[in-house]
């Protein structure tokens, strides 16, 4: 029975690396996959890229993309053994349900990878639905500078000061975000 998986974490826990490893494992065994990433993440240019240098081509999704229809169209051409979605926090509620239908109705496993919360500790819409309906939840671990598990994403200015307001989504990497434990996240926002 196919399942909907959600692998979640803070920044810098290796979500994209883990996705790319899973994709490689399927392909190494002669299986077909379809990799997706959010068009919103303009750093990717049609690729899923990891900080350690691994990368693979990917289809872009936007809020209006019908994930189920797009995957099934590809599935008719080449039987898909797995669908992998990077930046899953940017999925809409409808898209998460479409991905669930791929697993439930069509027997295609779907592996989603994304952030659980934004820079203020609030759930992203896609992540909220995935946390609610995924068959399997897997937390990937990142490490705070103190050695504790980093579960929060602190947005920072160019000079490293904490940002406590703004749009939920602002694309960036280590230049804009720091993964911290909840204690150091809270202290940084109060400073």
Image (cartoon, rainbow, N blue to C red):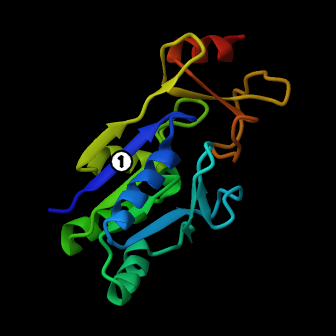
State the image quarter where residue 62 is shown: bottom right
The residue where tag 1 is placed is 6
The quadrant the C terminus occupies is top right
Residue 177 position within the rendered picture, expressed as x and y whole percent measured from the top left: 68, 32
Determine if residue 119 is in view.
yes
Structural crowding at the residue carrying mark 1, measured as other residues with C-alpha within 10 Å and reported as few (<14), some (14–19) or many (≥20) = many
State the image quarter where residue 104 is shown: bottom left
Residue 86 position within the rendered picture, expressed as x and y whole percent measured from the top left: 50, 55
Residue 32 position within the rendered picture, expressed as x and y whole percent measured from the top left: 36, 73
The quadrant the N terminus occupies is bottom left
Residue 50 position within the rendered picture, expressed as x and y whole percent measured from the top left: 59, 48
Helix, strand or loop at disc 1? strand
Query: Among all residues in the image, which is located at the extreme left?
Result: 1
51 vs 157, nearest the viewer: 51
Image-based side of 101 in relation to 24, left or right: left
38 vs 29, nearest the viewer: 29
State the image quarter where residue 102 is shown: bottom left
Query: Among all residues in the image, which is located at the extreme bottom?
Result: 77
Residue 60 vs 180, above or below: the answer is below
Residue shown at 53% from the left, 72% from the top: 64
1 vs 64, nearest the viewer: 1
Residue shown at 78% from the left, 21% from the top: 161
Image-based side of 51 in relation to 123, left or right: right
Residue 79 vs 164, above or below: the answer is below
Residue 75 vs 16, above or below: the answer is below
Residue shown at 70% from the left, 45% from the top: 170
Image-based side of 18 in relation to 120, left or right: left
């Amino acid at each position: 029975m196919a399942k909907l998986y959600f692998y979640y974490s803070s920044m810098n826990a290796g979500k994209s690396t883990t996705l790319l490893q899973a994709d490689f494992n399927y392909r190494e065994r002669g299986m077909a996959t379809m990799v997706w990433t959010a068009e919103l993440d303009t750093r990717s240019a049609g690729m899923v890229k990891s900080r350690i240098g691994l990368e693979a081509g990917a289809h872009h999704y936007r809020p209006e993309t019908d994930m189920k229809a797009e995957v099934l169209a590809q599935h008719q051409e080449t039987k898909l053994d797995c669908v992998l979605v990077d930046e899953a926090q940017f999925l809409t509620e409808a898209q998460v349900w479409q991905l669930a239908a791929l697993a439930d109705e069509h027997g295609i496993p779907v592996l989603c990878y994304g952030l659980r919360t934004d820079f203020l500790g609030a759930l992203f819409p896609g992540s909220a639905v995935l946390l609610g309906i995924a068959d399997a939840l897997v937390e990937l671990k990142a490490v705070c500078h103190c050695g504790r598990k980093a579960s929060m994403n602190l947005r920072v200015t160019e000079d490293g000061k904490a940002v406590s307001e703004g749009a939920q989504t602002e694309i960036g990497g280590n230049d804009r975000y720091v993964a911290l434990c909840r204690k150091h996240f809270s202290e940084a926002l109060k400073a």
